[in-house]
Structure formats: C-alpha cells, structure tokens
Amino acid sequence: MKISKKSEYALRALACLGTPGAPEVLSIQEIARRERIPKKFLEQVLLALKRVGLVQSTRGKAGGYALSGDPQAISLQTVVWAVDGPLAPLPCVADANPVKCADCASLEYCWLRGIMLEVGEAIAAAFARVSVAEMCQRAEASRRRESHVPMYDI
Amino acid sequence: MKISKKSEYALRALACLGTPGAPEVLSIQEIARRERIPKKFLEQVLLALKRVGLVQSTRGKAGGYALSGDPQAISLQTVVWAVDGPLAPLPCVADANPVKCADCASLEYCWLRGIMLEVGEAIAAAFARVSVAEMCQRAEASRRRESHVPMYDI
DNA sequence: TAAATCCCTACTTATTTAGTAGACAATGAC
DNA sequence: GTCATTGTCTACTAAATAAGTAGGGATTTA
C-alpha cells in the first residue's frame, strides 16, 4: 500500500513550486537540484502533471514549470491519481476501466469488491483532505524548524 | 496503492473458513480448490496468518486450518498487516521500524512524513472498520445472490 | 508403516517500478 | 540565423518486488 516514487517526487516538486518567496517558474534542473531528484525522471513526472493541468510550462531559455490553477483547490488525491493512477486497493475497484478479477462471476457480484470499494473511497478521501496549498505551508513550516535544529537532533 | 495477491488470498481464505455451514476445519487443499488459489502459495499465506494467531492448524490426516479467536474482534487491518506489512504510504511511516527517506534531515522534521502519517492512519482505519465476521456475512450474502443470477447477467 | 496433512526454506519467473538515453522542438540572446 | 538553453516525447535498461513453484521434513491418524 505504498505510493510510488513518482508520486513522492510529484508532491515534492509541487511543494517546491509553491514555496513562498521562490521564483514562480523553476526549471526541471533547478527542481531536481533542490529536491535531489534524478532530473530525467523528474522530467516525466512533471510531464504527467502537465497533462492533467496541474502545472504549466514554458520552453526555451529561462523556461520552466509553474503551478497552474489554485493550490487551495487542488488536493493530493488529484496529484497522486495523475501519476499513480486510481487509488484502488484492487484492480477491480479502479474508477477508470476496472478489471474484473479472474475468479469472480462479475463485477457486481463480488463481495470483496464491495468491501474494497469502501476502503478505496476512504483512501481517496484521506488524500483529498490535504490541498497542495496546505502541503506547501507545511513544507515551509518544516524548513523553518529545520533551520534551527540543534546538532544533536540530526 | 494496491493490496497484494497474498492479502487477497488471505481474505478469501478467512471468508472460506468463516462460511456458515462449512466444516470448522478445512485443509489447504480444500480452501485452494474452493477459492481457486494456487495451493502452495496459499500454504505460505496461511502460515503467515497462523504466525499472528488469526488461524490455528492441526496436522496429520484430517488436519487443516480453522479460524482462531473471535471473527467479530478481528479486522481486515490485522489481516492485511499480517501478510503485507504496515499499511503505510511511505516507508518512513511504517509503524514497525520506519525507514528514513534518503533526502530528509530526520524522521521528525520531514513534512511529507507528517502528511503521510495522517493518510496512513486513515487507510488503516478504513481497513479496521470491517471485521472478519462482517466480511464472512457479506461473502455469504453475495453467494446467495449469485446463485439466482439470470443467465444474461453473467 | 503408510497416507495425508501441515511446516519451512529456497528457488524461479513475471510484473512493476525506477531510472537512463537520445533525438526533437521551441524560445531567446547575440 | 545560429547557438545555447530549455521543455517534449519515446524507447530502452536495470533494479526491486510480487507471484508462484519445488521439495524435503515433521506430525498425526488409521
């Protein structure tokens, strides 16, 4: 029940782009450096985020990525969904083209599916509760705390 | 964010053992046949369930597995935890020996961890809400419905 | 003692995830 | 217009994990 590295990187990248005081537009390279993410891998992640409209990009010199849309209105569910696909505990529970399990008579009559549908909704809700804006705030708060961490705490 | 086949099989096996009217004790072979699970694989799954005390076994001829403990009191969280490990969205959120992410200063100061701790708790809670007993009931209800499904529905 | 069963460890294969490579397209500075 | 710098896209490779298989040992009952 883990999220992928892709999702983790997506979240970090968005937090990076939403850092107060940072430039609106950051290049892949810059984000990769700040978050210590393999650049070419991050490239694909950002592309996925772009496809669903969570970020926008400009090309050429001084190009890069910027947040798109209202960070308050975008939830982590949207982000994770965009890169990892449906937040479903079983393939037959996926919101986009669910795959029937081999041994079940049908999607409608599978009891396990019924249970997992509910669980899946709870998982989605858990991610939905946190907005990108809130994530950025928490990241910022953490940075401030970190900056005066006593040595023996690291 | 999927559960493993192992977990799925574990749930099916428990539902099988909790079927009203079925023998208390079922052999691996019998469970495998009923649920169409590879026998040798199921063997490992049941062993894992036994180790945490969810089932008990008797050896020798006419041996097999039976539920152990009160099905009302056992949640799906316990089951999935037993075979898949912690229900955590990131390795650093695992309840049993959490692994610090490479790029974080420490477990305490990672903002992503803070968020994922909350998400992880919600996921755990979602599984915790369903008991093995309830699962068995739902499976039974589904079996009844399935038995008079009109042909064109399959 | 023989048959049936669970117990345990190791191995193999398949699938998914993570990461890399390289050619291409757009933009801006000169 | 050329060049450096950036994003776009597709394909490939490597590493990790999940799924399944194999086989010998231990225990019980008949």
Image (spheres, coloured by chain):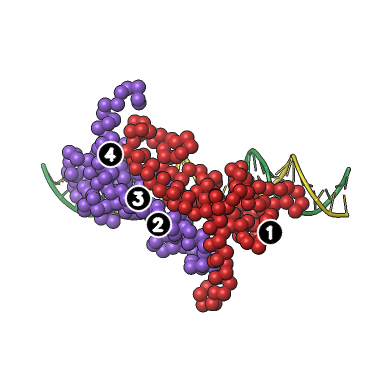
Chain colours: A red, B purple, C yellow, D green
Q: Which mark is residue B121?
A: 2
Residue on which disc 1 sits:
A23
How far apart, in angstroms, are the residues tagged by discs 4 and 1?
55 Å
Chain to which mark 1 belongs? A
Look at the numbered discs 1 and 3 and tell me whether their residues touch, using CB distance below 8 Å. Answer: no
Q: Secondary structure at mark 4?
A: helix
Residue A97 in view in this figure: yes
- Say what amino acid the circle numbered 1 marks: Pro
- Say what amino acid the circle numbered 4 marks: Ala
Look at the numbered discs 3 and 2 and tell me whether their residues touch, using CB distance below 8 Å. Answer: no
How far apart, in angstroms, are the residues tagged by discs 3 and 4?
16 Å
Look at the numbered discs 1 and 2 and tell me whether their residues touch, using CB distance below 8 Å. Answer: no
Whether callout 1 and callout 3 share a subunit is answered no
Chain to which mark 2 belongs? B
Residue B56 in view in this figure: no
How far apart, in angstroms, are the residues tagged by discs 2 and 4?
26 Å
